[in-house]
Image (cartoon, rainbow, N blue to C red):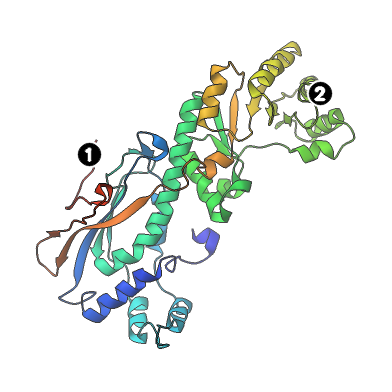
Amino acid sequence: MGSIYKENLSMLTDLYQLTMAYAGWKSGTAQGPRRKVGVFDLYFRANPFGGGYAIHCGLNSALDLIESYGFSDSDCAYLESLKGRDGKPLFDPAFLRFLQETRLEVDIDAVEEGRVVFAGEPLLRVQGPVWQCQLLETPLLNLINFETLIATKAARVKFAAGRDDVLEFGLRRAQGVDGGISASRAAYVGGADATSNILAGKLHGIPVRGTHAHSWVMAFDDEREAFLAFADAMPNNSVFLVDTYDTLEGVRNAAEAGRWLKSQGHQMLGIRLDSGDLAYLSCEARQILDSAGLPEAKIVASNDLDETLIQNLKMQGARIDIWGIGTKLVTASDQPALGGVFKLVAVKDGDSDWKYRMKLSEQLAKITTPGLHQVRR
């Protein structure tokens, strides 16, 4: 995370986490013999997408944040500027010095990334001073909720695709810079085979894939000329986007470029369909490519695909080899949030025994399970 933001993200939290930390400091429960130690579970209440499981993701980002945790001079200068309703400083300067001098004393137990997990079981357990655990609540939920959601979506897409490759193409539609990078990483954890996101590839070692856009074709007077120019420039990475004008004519032009590549000792990788009736067009494209002596050329499909559309296209007999999934994957369009929570399940003062804690609610789903939990398969 530091490679993106160039500093730690300790301020990535909600104000009420800091006001609780301040109240603990003032009351003497943040340090000394009366210090309260707690255990918090991070879990989600319902399996996403109406399914039966989730894929745990975001742990590496969470540990990265915890290992670099600390409040800088500029952080404390900002906190010192905050005022209460009476116009007086919100925080005592001595508390801000306490923040700067304190290092996290938390133990983390977690399910490994990429594991199948279920509603109600802890993905991550944090044990330590209550005020420190509270400071971690918001960033941990931010990181794990989103990446787990996207990894689960990717797993569902990959399951629908079967043995076909799945490419994550969502950066331009992602929710901001970090939303794009963490979505690419989570999609890879969930089963995507590669991403178009170069920065995610650099930061996380994810394979990258991609060729050209419609603008490449439109910059030339003739589609055939555009394909041949691209083939000449990229003989080892030629996948031609064929639907800029007339899709099937585009496939024929791509086949001509493919034959030229073959004559030069290279191999055309394939074509991409980005619009229209993908089942019909892929079947027609397969016939054209095979007739041109290019049976090895793959057919890539994109255009707002998800697991449901992939299943439908397969049922229609589509001849698609590779699936490019963008918006609906990186935004989890049919469920925009996981709804994970971070709840206190046990607490003790000083050297006392653990006291289990349970939150009650008129909503059954919001009642918590007290005690120190372990996950078993």
Relative horizontal placement of residue 47, taking residue 203 as reference (left or right) = left
Q: Return the x and y of residue 8 as percentages of the image width and height.
A: 46, 66
Residue 376 marker = 1
Relative horizontal placement of residue 91, taking residue 179 as reference (left or right) = left
Residue extending furthest toward the left: 353
Q: Quadrant of residue 235?
A: top right
Q: Return the x and y of residue 330 as percentages of the image width and height.
A: 53, 44
Mark found first going from the N terminus, 2 or 1: 2
Find numbered disc 2 in the image and state the secondary structure of the residue it sits on.
Answer: helix
Q: Nearer the viewer, residue 362 or 58?
A: 362
- For badge 2, the amino acid type reads Asn
Q: Return the x and y of residue 273 as percentages of the image width and height.
A: 69, 28
Q: Which residue is mark 2?
A: 253
- For badge 1, the amino acid type reads Arg
Q: Nearer the viewer, residue 317 or 94?
A: 317
Vertical arrangement, residue 87 with respect to residue 256, above or below? below
What crowding class fits label 2: few (fewer than 14 Cα within 10 Å), some (14-19), or many (20 or more)? many
